[in-house]
């Protein structure tokens, strides 16, 4: 870009729906939207800075391909207004609505801070982008999952297949038997019909013990998984 470096901070919001996310100048709540079919939900955006903030809101269909999220422009999810201009210290409401679909529909709201034309060209501007999960369902179902582990190429391939109709939100995920891998930790969504894979070291054990919980339902997903060799 000419004259300025533009840095975009991507903040993937995947916390409890009751929480507020504060990122410097902006506060957004809730950080997850759970909508009843045919009913609107509310999202609150507050500007804590001393200057006006402009934002664009893009409703996206949410699919998964392997470990990757695939987002595309949605015609079923509606956010109003699609653009915000928030004065210093003010809070605005965004209404979010989705057409009914069974059994569960999964979306993301991508909320992007827009450049301020008043900023000097020689200044590095940090623009925030929030990626908010939206679930539309009358009642989330208990998770239905299938774990598997396969040895090969000097490591272990651990796989979780979501065979149910509701997205699984993994937290407190850890693998035992002295397997230490950053890939086995952190908060992860697995959508209905999708799967997630982790590549881990292989210590030669006959099974993998893991501890996991679905944060949406509170159901434990702890398992002792035989290793296919």
Image (spheres, helix red, strand yellow):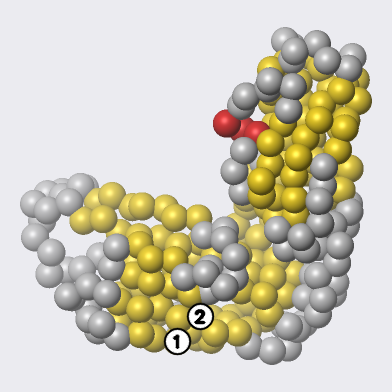
Q: Residue furthest bottom?
A: 39
In depth, the one of 5 and 141 nearer the eye is 141
Residue at x 61% of width, y 26% of height: 181
Rendered location of residue 149, percent (x, y): 84, 27
* SS for callout 1: strand
The answer to whether 193 is drawn above or below residue 152 in the figure is: below
* SS for callout 2: strand
Residue at x 29% of width, y 85% of height: 90
- For disc 2, the neighbor class at 10 Å (few under 14, some 14 to 19, many from 20) is some
Residue at x 21% of width, y 56% of height: 125
In depth, the one of 202 and 118 nearer the eye is 202
Rendered location of residue 139, percent (x, y): 82, 76
The answer to whether 224 is drawn above or below residue 131 in the figure is: above
- In the picture of the structure, the residue carrying the numbered disc 2 is 43
Left or right of 188 in this view: 223: right
Quadrant including the C terminus: top right
For residue 54, which quarter of the picture?
bottom left
Rendered location of residue 133, percent (x, y): 60, 65
In depth, the one of 115 and 95 nearer the eye is 95
Mark 2 and mark 1 in contact? Answer it, CB < 8 Å.
Answer: yes
Left or right of 133 in this view: 89: left
- In the picture of the structure, the residue carrying the numbered disc 1 is 93
- For disc 1, the neighbor class at 10 Å (few under 14, some 14 to 19, many from 20) is some
Answer with mark 2 or mark 1, whichever residue precedes in sequence. 2
Q: Is residue 63 visible?
A: yes
The answer to whether 186 is drawn above or below residue 18 in the figure is: above
Q: Which mark is residue 208?
A: none
């Amino acid at each position: 870009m000419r004259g300025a470096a533009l840095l975009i901070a991507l903040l993937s919001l995947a916390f409890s729906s009751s929480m507020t996310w504060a990122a410097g100048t902006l506060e957004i709540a809730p950080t997850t939207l759970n909508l009843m079919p045919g009913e609107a939900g509310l999202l609150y955006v507050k500007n804590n800075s001393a200057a006006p903030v402009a934002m664009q809101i893009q409703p996206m269909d949410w699919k998964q391909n392997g470990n990757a999220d695939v987002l595309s422009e949605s015609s079923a999810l509606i956010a109003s207004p699609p653009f915000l201009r928030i004065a210093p210290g003010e809070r605005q409401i965004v209404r979010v609505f989705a057409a009914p679909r069974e059994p569960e529909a999964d979306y993301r709201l991508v909320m992007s801070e827009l450049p301020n034309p008043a900023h000097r060209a020689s200044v590095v501007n940090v623009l925030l982008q929030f990626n908010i999960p939206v679930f539309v369902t009358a009642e989330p179902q208990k998770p239905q999952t299938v774990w598997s582990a396969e040895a090969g190429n000097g490591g272990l391939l651990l796989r979780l297949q979501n065979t149910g109709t509701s997205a699984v939100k993994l937290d407190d995920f850890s693998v035992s038997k002295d397997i230490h891998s950053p890939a086995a930790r952190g908060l992860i969504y697995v959508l209905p019909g999708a799967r997630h894979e982790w590549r881990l070291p292989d210590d030669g054990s006959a099974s993998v013990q893991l501890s996991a919980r679905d944060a949406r339902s509170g159901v434990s997903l702890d398992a002792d998984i035989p290793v296919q060799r």
